[in-house]
């Protein structure tokens, strides 16, 4: 009998990452909860409640063994797999994109594992009742993998952006002036001290603007772009997106100019947002790298599908497996 989990582990991993990493952030955004200062506790429900489902699917694909020892082994393997992925998801929420508020991390982990044991028992019992003759891997895996590549890349960028917005510390950054129709003193910026400042695009202002500050006998350029600009800053009058950073060598008044594809766009200079967690560095990574990270689960699905089809082509298939294997093909 083959192990169905082994033949579909890539699909299972992709589904788990989708449910536990981008889904909480996207739901927060779609339900307008960002204006309510989202907390970390509700995000923990996603991986915790997904744990019994994952354990049930893994247990359903375990080989059938007689006696209590066989059941215990299947439950142990399923719970261990669930524990690893649950810990990875909790680590993302805690250290990569930490939202505001506190959470009882130990209880979340233990609660997820307890639910995983229940799910594993149910899955093992259900998987043993249904059997069929295994069939070669279908081309459906290529379609699933291709869709996972596209959506994974897109969702990875959205996850980084929403994670940075939700992990920002403190109030909205203070503004020091800007250029464009929004700026009260167009083309004029007054900074209180030398150092690094953020350049914000107002509203739908294009992110690839070439902004420069001129003063104190020199011109400085905003040459540190933010590849995945977090937004949601500003107030009722307008929202800002952090598009770049500029280092100003001296305090005082500076003339600001920006060239972009929209001549009516407005840009302002302000304090750089403080973003907790690793997502504060991820927003500066090249977008292509972010896309690649998001596409990895889908690429793994395509690779495993190709390998399974190559292996199946070597001879006839005459082994028994559970019906869960048929459902994932």
Image (spheres, rainbow, N blue to C red):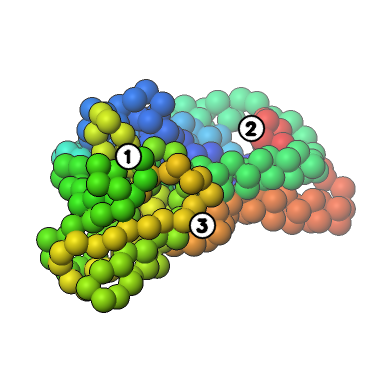
Distance Cα–Cα, label 1 vs label 3:
29 Å
Q: Residue at x 39, y 38 (%)?
A: 203
Front tag of 1 and 2: 1
State the separation of the CA atoms marked 1 and 2. Answer: 58 Å
Q: Which residue is mark 2?
A: 324
Pointer 1 residue: 182
Q: Residue at x 29, y 43 (%)?
A: 183
- Give the camera-side residue of 203 and 38: 203
Placement of the C terminus among the 4 image quadrants: top right
- From mark 3 to mark 2, how far is it between C-alphas? 37 Å
| 40 shown above or below 293 | above
Q: Residue at x 48, y 46 (%)?
A: 263
Q: Nearer the viewer, mark 3 or mark 2?
A: 3
Helix, strand, or loop for circle 1?
A: loop
Q: Residue furthest bottom?
A: 217
Query: Considering the image in quadrants, where does the N terminus appear?
Result: top right
For label 2, count other residues whose C-alpha is less than 10 Å away and answer few (under 14), some (14-19) or many (20+). many
The foreground one among 31 and 9 is 31
Q: At which x and y percent is residue 143?
A: 73, 40
> Which residue is nearer to you in this view: 287 or 75?
287
Q: Position of residue 173 (x, y in %)?
A: 20, 47
Q: Which of the two discs, 3 and 2, labels the residue nearer the N terminus?
A: 3
Which residue matches tag 3?
287
255 with respect to 107 (left or right): right
Q: Give yes or no for contact between labels 1 and 3 (Cβ–Cβ under 8 Å).
A: no
């Amino acid at each position: 009998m083959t192990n169905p989990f082994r033949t579909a582990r890539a699909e299972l991993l992709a589904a788990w990452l989708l449910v536990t990493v981008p889904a909480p952030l996207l739901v927060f955004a779609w339900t307008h909860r960002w204006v309510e200062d989202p907390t970390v506790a509700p995000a923990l429900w996603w991986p915790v409640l997904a744990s019994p489902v994952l354990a049930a699917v893994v247990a359903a694909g375990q080989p059938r063994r007689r006696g209590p020892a066989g059941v215990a082994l299947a439950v142990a393997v399923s719970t261990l797999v669930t524990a690893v992925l649950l810990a990875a998801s909790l680590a993302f929420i805690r250290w990569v994109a930490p939202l505001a508020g506190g959470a009882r991390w130990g209880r979340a982990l233990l609660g997820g594992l307890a639910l995983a044991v229940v799910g594993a028992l149910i899955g093992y019992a259900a998987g043993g009742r249904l059997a069929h003759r295994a069939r070669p891997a279908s081309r459906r895996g290529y379609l699933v993998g291709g869709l996972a590549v596209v959506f994974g890349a897109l969702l990875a960028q959205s996850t980084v952006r929403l994670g940075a917005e939700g992990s920002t510390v403190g109030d909205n950054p203070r503004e020091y002036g800007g250029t464009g129709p929004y700026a009260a003193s167009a083309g004029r910026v007054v900074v209180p001290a030398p150092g690094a400042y953020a350049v914000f695009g107002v509203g739908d202002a294009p992110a690839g603007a070439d902004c420069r500050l001129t003063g104190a006998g020199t011109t400085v350029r905003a040459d540190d772009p933010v590849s995945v600009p977090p937004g949601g800053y500003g107030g009722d009058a307008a929202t800002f997106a952090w598009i770049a950073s500029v280092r100003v060598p001296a305090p005082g008044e500076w003339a600001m100019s920006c060239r972009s594809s929209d001549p009516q766009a407005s840009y302002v200079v302000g304090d750089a947002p403080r973003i907790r967690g690793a997502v504060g560095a991820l927003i500066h990574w090249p977008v292509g790298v972010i896309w690649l990270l998001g596409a990895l689960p889908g690429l793994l699905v395509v690779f495993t599908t190709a390998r399974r089809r190559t292996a199946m082509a070597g001879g006839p298939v005459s082994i028994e497996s559970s019906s869960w294997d048929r459902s994932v093909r």
